[in-house]
Structure formats: structure tokens, C-alpha cells
């Protein structure tokens, strides 16, 4: 069974999509998974989506590095499921979250967040070349001070 996680255009849309995913997954709990490992996979993924949704609903927590890291891991999960060619749908939400983080003066990029932004940009470039489109994550690496 395929699972879909497409990041939305803004935090509200992303939150709504995550809640829809969680509701759909909760509905599947009545059905018995094929094996124990698949059941555990659903539980861990649903927990990650639920906790991410809670952080996205908090204006302070939504700009924390852990949110970006969680989205990166969920995007990796999606990429493993469907391949990088279909991964371009994830980037609209990632772009919006990165833009929100950039606008906030309180959150100067840390080394970790700069590394995660580089990974997102790398995956976007690969997806763009496979799908014959322009990259969506551009202009995120302007010189700025990094905090440790």
C-alpha cells in the first residue's frame, strides 16, 4: 500500500495535509497489517507526523531545526517509497518553511539547518533534472552568519 505525504504551500496547508494523513492512517488501524514490521512502520511514521503537526501549530516551535530535520526524514521516507522523480511535489512546502525561517530574524541559520537546506537543494536539483523543470529551491544560500 502506498502512502502519500505532499507538503503544502504554507504551514496551515501542511498541517491540514498531515492531519488528513494521520486520519487516513488511523482508519487503517482496523485492518490487520501484513506483518509486525509493517505495523511498527505505520505506528512510527504516524507518531512522527502527529508530533510534526503539533510543532507546526506552534509559532515558536515551527521554526526550530527539529521541524526541518523531521521534514527532511519524512521526505527521505517519501523518496524511498516513490523515487526522486516524484519527489518534486514535496518542495513547495519545504520552500515555504525555509522562507519562513529566513524571514525570522530570531532564527539565524545554524550549521545543522544550513546542511539540511543544502540537502533539500540537492534533491530539488536532481528532481528538476529528472522532471525537466526549473529548480524550486533557489536563492537560499546567500552569505549569512551561521550560529554554532
Image: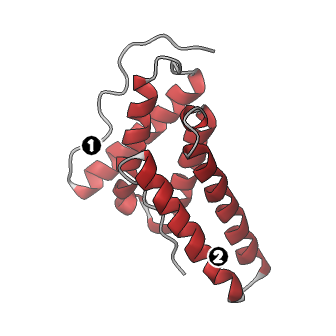
Asked if residue 100 is positioned above or below residue 131 in the image, the reply reads above
Number of numbered labels in the structure image: 2
Determine which residue is flagged by label 2. Answer: 26
Vertical relation: 34 (above or below) 89:
below
Q: CA distance from mark 1 to mark 2?
A: 35 Å
Between discs 1 and 2, the one toward the N terminus: 2
- SS class, disc 1: loop
The quadrant where residue 34 appears: bottom right
**Where in the figure is residue 3, as x and y percent of width and height?**
52, 72
Q: Quadrant of the N terminus?
A: bottom right
Viewer-proximal residue among 55 and 92: 55
Left or right: 86, with 37 as reference point: left
Horizontal and vertical percent for residue 37? Answer: 76, 74
Check disc 1 and report the residue beneath it.
Answer: 135
Density class for disc 1 (Cα within 10 Å; few <14, some 14-19, many ≥20) is: some
Instruction: Answer yes or no: is residue 33 visible.
Output: no
Q: Residue drawn at (58%, 32%), measured in percent from left and top?
A: 60
Amino acid at each position: 500500500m502506498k502512502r502519500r505525504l505532499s507538503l503544502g504551500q504554507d504551514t496551515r496547508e501542511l498541517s491540514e495535509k498531515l492531519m488528513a494523513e494521520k486520519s487516513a492512517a488511523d482508519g487503517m488501524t482496523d485492518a490487520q497489517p501484513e506483518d509486525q514490521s509493517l505495523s511498527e512502520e505505520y505506528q512510527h511514521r504516524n507518531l512522527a507526523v502527529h508530533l510534526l503537526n503539533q510543532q507546526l501549530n506552534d509559532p515558536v516551535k515551527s521554526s526550530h531545526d527539529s521541524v526541518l530535520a523531521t521534514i527532511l526524514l519524512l521526505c527521505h521516507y517519501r523518496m524511498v517509497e516513490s523515487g526522486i522523480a516524484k519527489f518534486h511535489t514535496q518542495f513547495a512546502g519545504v520552500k515555504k518553511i525555509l522562507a519562513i525561517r529566513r524571514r525570522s530574524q530570531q532564527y539565524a541559520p545554524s550549521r545543522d539547518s544550513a546542511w539540511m537546506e543544502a540537502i533539500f537543494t540537492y534533491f530539488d536539483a536532481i528532481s528538476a533534472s529528472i522532471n525537466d523543470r526549473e529548480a524550486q529551491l533557489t536563492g537560499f544560500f546567500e552569505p549569512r552568519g551561521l550560529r554554532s
